[in-house]
């Protein structure tokens, strides 16, 4: 039996070039639209002195560049830069998690510190944000490709999906002072390390993703899914103690992923609630579970279940309809093509079923290394007790190909395999949250880092119908991405509403 196809090395270079070109394109569009169009709101350069700092007069050498950079700070970028400069001054600023402001502050105080006298502190903070996010996006695209190759076992489909990710409809946010790029890098990279069996590194990355965006805590669901299936295998083997070990390990990893977000909520409680008399405390401080983030989202931005279902919000639902339609289609197509896997959550009655998610997570999540060799990454007792022995001949490639040959057949490749299931469940939950709870227009960027969207679009462009039909799907998908890139770069950069 021949080995599985080794991933061609040039594909990594292709993805790297596409990611860099896409960022240069977005930055060029931002500069173009800022030059040609008058911003709706010109208050971006206004920057009151920090509450905790005495005002400082600052003379800059290049005021025109300083003004251009400061005026490019719009929408949520104003909060991120303000936090990086002044810390958390107001209650509503705690809606913006600390990882991006911390990175901006560190870069502006180190590498870019000499530029403060040239363009001023706030412009340096903005420049730091642009550099961090664009570099983070390029790295996230590379990790996206690596993850796609492992899951799909189809380098061509992984390449198409990764190129789509490079030019995704929410691209403007990945090149602005927003947290999307850092979140994409940490979540996609963390999942790549999780699937590659590097549990400690994956937990660190996924935990940091929860410091970039609040939905990073949902990445603990992948660990829960893995833990459930490892426990299932252990119980099938009648190893109760081993099952307890697996559950304890999974619970500990989930706690670690939640820890940064919870610590930040505790930090907010300490700053806002402690030291105040009961009648002077904010309402959320008195709750049984004083969760600052939920209160801010509800009180300041009106986020809540069905609260956005108003006739006047119909344009925002239309704006989000393409990404939501693609998300729903991704889930529905998977459910129809693999109903037994989908509705059983990957559980099967027998461990001998080669398509079982239990086999995937017990064998593949624990018996591989980054160079493709078999390696026991978790407890040796788990491997021995589960008695899941792979064939000796493994695929050695730059991207780990961790399934033995008996698992490398056509049925184990592509979008409808059990390996895609946890990503589908994650996407379904996020899409439902965006539609029923959040400001729905945010769905475009909220879902933009979800791999199944691009995997499904990749296969849709390749396998749907006849040749002409496939081309029409391809044109539709690329037209959607191009339209939102042009529209987003025009509206968003000039302080007009866009997702």
Image: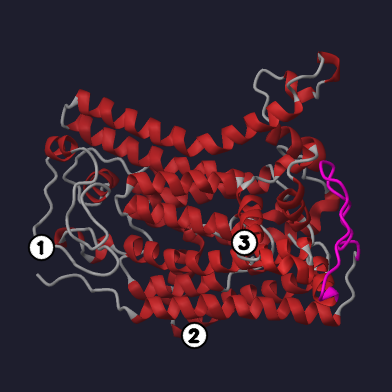
Between disc 2 and disc 1, the foreground one is 1
Q: Which residue is mark 1?
A: 393
Looking at the image, which is closer to me, 385 or 104?
A: 104
Q: Quadrant of the N terminus?
A: bottom left
Q: Which residues are magenta?
A: 42-63
The answer to whether 485 is drawn above or below residue 217 in the figure is below
At 51% across and 62% down in the image, what residue appears?
453
Q: Which mark is residue 323?
A: 3
Of the image marks 2 and 1, the number of the one nearer the N terminus: 1
Residue at 60% of width from left, 63% of height from top?
A: 132
Protein image colouring: secondary structure
Q: Are marks 2 and 1 in contact (CB under 8 Å)?
A: no
Tell me: residue 77, above or below residue 28.
above
Mark 3 vs mark 1, foreground winner is 1
Asked which quadrant contains residue 282, the reply is top right
Contact? badges 3 and 1 (CB < 8 Å) = no
Residue at screen point 74% across, 39% down: 297
Relative to residue 176, is residue 377 drawn left or right?
left
- Mark 2 element type: helix
Disc 3 packing (10 Å; few <14; some 14–19; many ≥20): many
From the image, state whether disc 2 or disc 3 is nearer to you.
Answer: 3
Q: Nearer the viewer, residue 364 or 187?
A: 187
Q: Where's residue 385, x and y in %?
A: 13, 35
Q: Which residue is mark 2?
A: 468
* Residue 499: % across, % down: 73, 59
Using residue 113 as the reference point, say whether residue 117 is left or right of it: right
Real-space Cα separation, disc 3 to disc 1, in angstroms: 42 Å
Residue 344 visible in the shown view: no
Q: Residue furthest bottom?
A: 468
């Amino acid at each position: 039996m021949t080995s599985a196809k080794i991933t061609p090395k040039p594909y990594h270079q292709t993805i790297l070039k596409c990611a860099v070109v896409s960022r240069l394109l977005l930055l060029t569009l931002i500069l173009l639209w800022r030059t040609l169009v008058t911003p709706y709101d010109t208050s971006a350069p206004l920057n009151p002195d920090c509450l905790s700092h005495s005002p400082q007069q600052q003379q800059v050498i290049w005021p025109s560049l300083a003004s251009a950079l400061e005026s490019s700070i719009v929408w949520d970028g104003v909060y991120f830069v303000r936090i990086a400069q002044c810390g958390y001054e107001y209650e509503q600023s705690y809606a913006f998690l600390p990882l991006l402001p911390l990175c901006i502050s560190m870069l502006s105080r180190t590498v870019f510190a000499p530029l403060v006298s040239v363009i001023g502190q706030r412009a340096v903070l903005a420049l730091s944000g642009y550099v961090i996010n664009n570099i983070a996006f390029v790295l996230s695209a590379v990790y996206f490709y690596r993850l796609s190759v492992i899951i799909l076992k189809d380098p061509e489909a992984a390449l198409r999906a990764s190129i789509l990710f490079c030019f995704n409809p929410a691209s403007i946010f990945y090149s602005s002072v927003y947290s999307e790029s850092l979140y994409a890098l940490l979540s996609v990279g963390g999942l790549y390390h999780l699937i590659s069996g590097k549990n400690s590194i994956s937990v660190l990355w996924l935990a940091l993703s929860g410091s970039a965006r609040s939905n990073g805590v949902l990445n603990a669901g992948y660990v829960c899914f893995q833990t459930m299936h490892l426990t299932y295998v252990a119980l099938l083997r009648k190893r109760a103690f081993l099952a307890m070990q697996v559950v304890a390990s999974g619970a500990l990893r989930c706690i670690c992923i939640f820890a940064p977000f919870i610590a930040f909520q505790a930090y907010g409680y300490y700053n806002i609630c402690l030291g105040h008399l009961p009648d002077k405390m904010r309402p959320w401080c008195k709750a049984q579970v004083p969760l600052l983030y939920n209160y801010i989202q509800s009180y300041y931005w009106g986020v809540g279940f069905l609260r956005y279902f108003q006739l006047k919000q119909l344009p925002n639902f239309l704006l989000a309809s393409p990404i939501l339609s693609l998300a729903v289609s991704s889930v529905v197509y998977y459910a129809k093509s693999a109903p037994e896997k989908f509705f059983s959550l990957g559980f099967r009655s027998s461990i001998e079923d080669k398509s079982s998610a239990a086999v995937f997570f017990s064998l593949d999540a624990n018996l591989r290394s980054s160079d493709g060799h078999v390696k026991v990454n978790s407890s040796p007792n788990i491997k021995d007790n589960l008695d899941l022995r792979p064939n000796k001949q493994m695929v050695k490639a730059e991207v780990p190909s961790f399934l033995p040959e008996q698992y490398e057949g056509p049925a184990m490749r592509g979008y409808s395999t059990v390996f895609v299931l946890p990503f589908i469940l994650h996407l379904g939950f996020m899409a439902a949250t965006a539609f029923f709870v959040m400001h729905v227009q945010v769905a475009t960027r909220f879902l933009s880092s979800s791999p199944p969207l691009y995997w499904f679009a990749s296969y849709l462009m390749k396998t749907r119908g006849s040749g002409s039909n496939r081309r029409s799907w391809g044109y539709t998908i690329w037209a959607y991405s191009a339209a939102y890139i042009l529209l987003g770069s025009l509206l968003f950069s000039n302080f007009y509403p866009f997702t």
